Image (cartoon, rainbow, N blue to C red):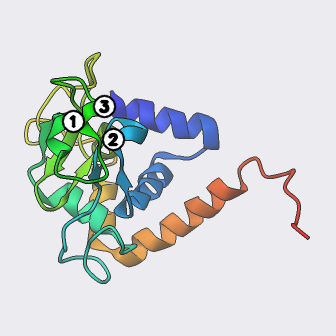
């Protein structure tokens, strides 16, 4: 499943356990994916939100990512690349007719998630095109779903655990770093 692959990657590369991976992925409460960089388009947390510390939106570092993941009925979609023609940052002439983004989970007005994000909460496989094997409501809970719910319920708990795993990640393989003069 996508969940197993995500956890194996972070375990192999960084020696993270499932809880640490779930905490680290919360960094997606900030920022966005850009079509030309990744094949995906959207802001992970774009809605105003009502939870977390200070509400939601891609400029607040809080637990809104988890609140959204556990609170909405997410839909799966591939977006037509030419649908971004109203965005002055896109030259839609660079896309082929019918070209789409990768499969992504969406809630209008609230944000989007990649399969890696959603695999923290839902357990599914993907086909060769990256399409998940079930819908949000039909997918069973992932093994880390209770951790997602815990982080959704407490910004304080998530911030503490994120800080610890982020520090661990920064220290990974840094035995040759030197102070800059």
Element under label 1? helix
Distance between the Cα atoms at labels 1 and 3?
9 Å
Where residue 113 appears, as percent x and y from the top left, is 27, 47
Q: Which residue is mark 2?
A: 35
Task: Say the numbered circle drawn on residue 61.
Answer: none
Q: Are marks 2 and 3 in contact (CB under 8 Å)?
A: no
Instruction: Quarter of the image for the N terminus: give it.
Output: top left
Q: Residue furthest top?
A: 128
Distance between the Cα atoms at labels 2 and 3?
12 Å
Q: Quadrant of residue 52?
A: bottom left
Query: Does label 1 or label 3 sit earlier along the sequence?
Result: 1
Q: Residue at x 13, y 53 (%)?
A: 107
Where residue 116 appears, as percent x and y from the top left, is 35, 40
Task: Say the numbered circle drawn on residue 81.
Answer: 1
Q: Which marked residue is nearer to the observer: mark 2 or mark 3?
A: 3
Q: Quadrant of residue 66?
A: bottom left
Count of all numbered marks drawn on residues in the image: 3
Element under label 2? helix
Q: Residue at x 18, y 45 (%)?
A: 85
Q: Residue at x 34, y 48 (%)?
A: 144
Pointer 1: residues within 10 angstroms few (<14), some, or many (20+)?
many
Distance between the Cα atoms at labels 2 and 1?
8 Å
Q: Which residue is mark 3?
A: 94
Q: Are marks 2 and 1 in contact (CB under 8 Å)?
A: yes
Q: Residue at x 16, y 51 (%)?
A: 86
């Amino acid at each position: 499943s996508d969940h197993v692959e995500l956890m194996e990657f972070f375990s192999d590369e960084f020696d993270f356990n499932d809880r640490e991976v779930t905490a680290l992925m919360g960094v997606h409460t900030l920022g966005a994916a850009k079509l030309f960089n990744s094949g995906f388009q959207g802001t992970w947390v774009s809605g105003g939100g009502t939870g977390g510390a200070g509400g939601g939106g891609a400029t607040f570092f809080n637990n809104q990512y988890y609140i959204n993941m556990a609170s909405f009925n997410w839909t799966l979609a591939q977006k037509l690349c030419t649908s971004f023609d109203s965005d002055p940052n896109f030259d839609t002439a660079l896309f082929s007719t019918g070209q789409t983004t990768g499969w992504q989970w969406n809630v209008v007005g609230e944000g989007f998630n990649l399969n890696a994000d959603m695999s923290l909460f839902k357990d599914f496989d993907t086909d060769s095109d990256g399409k998940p094997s079930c819908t949000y409501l039909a997918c069973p809970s992932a093994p880390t779903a209770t951790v997602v719910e815990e982080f959704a319920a407490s910004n304080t708990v998530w911030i503490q655990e994120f800080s610890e795993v982020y520090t661990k990640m920064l220290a990974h393989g840094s035995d040759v770093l030197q102070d800059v003069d």
